[in-house]
Amino acid sequence: MSDPTLLVLASLADGDKHGYAMMADIREFAGVELGPGTLYGAITRLEASGFIKGLPSSDRRRPYRLTAGGRAHLKEQIAALEPVIRAGARRLKRA
């Protein structure tokens, strides 16, 4: 999975995070290096869609939170990926 928006949603499903913390988390759980432009582009799209929201911050690092709509969207996307993953695994066994 390398879609930046899904990676951001998956990261925020574990709790509120600012951009750098998301980049580190995504690198750890997915092995994907997101550059700042890619990350903040995904954040902008997710915020505009209402899937995440920015939280107040006392410094320049702004944390983000997954919304109920974002949680539902992530669940839908995971459910859509599951048949592909199962088919791929089945086919690899036969190869």
Image (tube, rainbow, N blue to C red):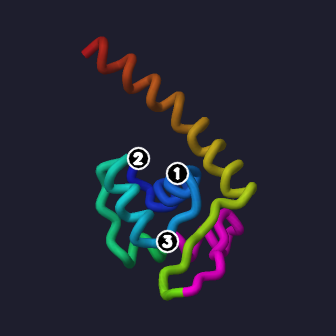
Looking at the rendered structure, the secondary structure element under dot 3 is loop
Check the image and name the residue furthest to the front.
Answer: 58
The label on residue 10 is: 1
Answer whether labels 2 and 1 touch (C-beta < 8 Å): yes
Residue segment shown in magenta: 42-58
- Mark 1: amino acid: Ala
* Residue that badge 2 annotates: 1
Check the image and name the residue furthest to the top.
Answer: 94
Residue that appears at 64% across and 43% down: 75
The label on residue 18 is: 3
Q: Which of labels 2 and 3 is toward the front?
A: 3
Q: Position of residue 57 (x, y in %)?
A: 59, 82
Gap between marks 2 and 3, in whole Å? 21 Å
- Mark 3: amino acid: His
Q: Is residue 44 left or right of residue 40?
A: right
Give the camera-side residue of 41 and 17. Answer: 17
- Mark 2: amino acid: Met
Q: Residues within 10 Å of mark 3 (few under 14, many from 20)?
A: some
> Which image quadrant is residue 62 in?
bottom right
Looking at the rendered structure, the secondary structure element under dot 2 is loop
The answer to whether residue 48 is magenta is yes
First in residue order: circle 2 vs circle 3: 2
Q: Position of residue 34 (x, y in %)?
A: 34, 65
Gap between marks 3 and 1, in whole Å? 14 Å
